[in-house]
Amino acid sequence: MSSNVRIALDAMGGDNAPAIVIAGASIARKRYPYLNLSFIGESKKIRALIKKYKNLNDAKIIHADDIVAPDARPAQVLRRGKKTSMWLAVNEVATDNADAIVSAGNTGALMAMSKLQLKMISGVTRPAIAGFIPTLKGLCCMLDLGANIEVDERNLVQFGIMGASFCSAITGKNNASVGILNVGEEDQKGFDYLRRAGTALSDETLNLNYVGFIEGSDIVTGNTDVIVTDGFTGNVALKTAEGTAKFFMHHLRKTFRSSILSRIGFLLTRTAFIKMRRTVDPRYYNGAILLGLNGVCVKSHGGADSIGFSNAIGVACDLVKHEFIPKVNDSISAAEKVIQFSAE
């Protein structure tokens, strides 16, 4: 692989595009100076904004006539969206002009376009959205975060394999622990398909560090590196965690402002408070990958600011550097027997 990492950016995707996309790219370029960036979108707007950032002078600009609306349906954009910035950005990866694509646009449209152009990894039945959340011991990967409302045991086994590879690529852990989210830790708890998935994941031929079922209260302990669940449960858990963090920070600020003594207390603990705020700040964990695709596709939160978008670019860069796709291909191929067994 070349020492340079080529990233195609959907410059028009997200609530504050293209300004946030370009500002985020500049931040990412400082961290990863070897990035080759391509901005896909309305060329006049992009050129005007890029002038503000000296480290983006060599970036490539690809004009796109249209954008994907936030509320557009996937089937609709597949029929009419081939001139959009999102389609053309994904196409850069599909035609090997880029190593990864990052977009903050419509999630359903991005999934549909990427699945059509990049295709699925051989053997994988469904893609999954995977991302990181902070815990008491660092980062924890959770999937699926919304791509599949209903799943079966075969899907969960594949999610576990892909999630372990993703976690290893980003965190450097070579033996990431994998658990299935359930209503209890006991083997007899939960639906039948959960128990069958647990049996398959514990098979020694997978060479996977499967630790069994975990409960919702275990998510933030950090005792499990990869948490596998269906898209409905995963999305609810993620949004609940984000909402709880905002609720806590809001009331903490309100408390600090409630009296003179509280304000003095804030001044005395300001450094610790800033450190804690960064720990729970979702911007620093922004960047979810669409796992199962035969190419690196990273989804940024639509409302992310420049710091959040730069982190999404960083996720894409790390996955390319660690040759994530070939490793997942090998893992899925090696586990084919167990996956077939688990689907019976």
Image (spheres, grey):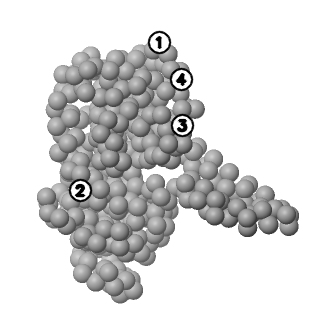
Q: Sequence order check: which comes first, mark 2 or mark 1?
A: 1
Residue 205 appears at what percent x and percent y?
22, 22
Q: Quadrant of residue 164?
A: top left
Query: Amino acid under label 2?
Result: Lys
Q: Residue furthest front?
A: 268
| Mark 2: few/some/many CA within 10 Å (<14, 14-19, 20+) | some
Give the structural element (helix, strand or loop) at label 2. Answer: helix
Please give left or right for residue 310 compared with residue 335 in the image.
right
Give the structural element (helix, strand or loop) at label 4. Answer: loop
Q: 220 or 91: nearer the eye?
A: 220
Disc number lying in front (2 or 1):
2
Query: Amino acid under label 3?
Result: Thr
Residue 323 appears at what percent x and percent y?
20, 50
Disc number lying in front (2 or 4):
2
Q: CA distance from mark 2 to mark 4?
A: 37 Å
Please give left or right for residue 312 compared with residue 16 in the image.
left
What residue is pinned by disc 1? Answer: 188
Give the structural element (helix, strand or loop) at label 3. Answer: helix
Q: CA distance from mark 1 to mark 4?
A: 10 Å
Q: CA distance from mark 1 to mark 3?
A: 23 Å
Q: CA distance from mark 2 to mark 3?
A: 29 Å
Q: Quadrant of residue 91?
A: bottom left
What residue is pinned by disc 2? Answer: 321
Residue 232 appears at what percent x and percent y?
47, 36
The circle on residue 183 is 4
Disc number lying in front (3 or 4):
3
Give the structural element (helix, strand or loop) at label 1. Answer: loop
Residue drawn at x 32%, y 47% is 172
From where the camera sits, is residue 171 visible?
yes
The circle on residue 221 is 3
Q: Sequence order check: which comes first, mark 3 or mark 4?
A: 4
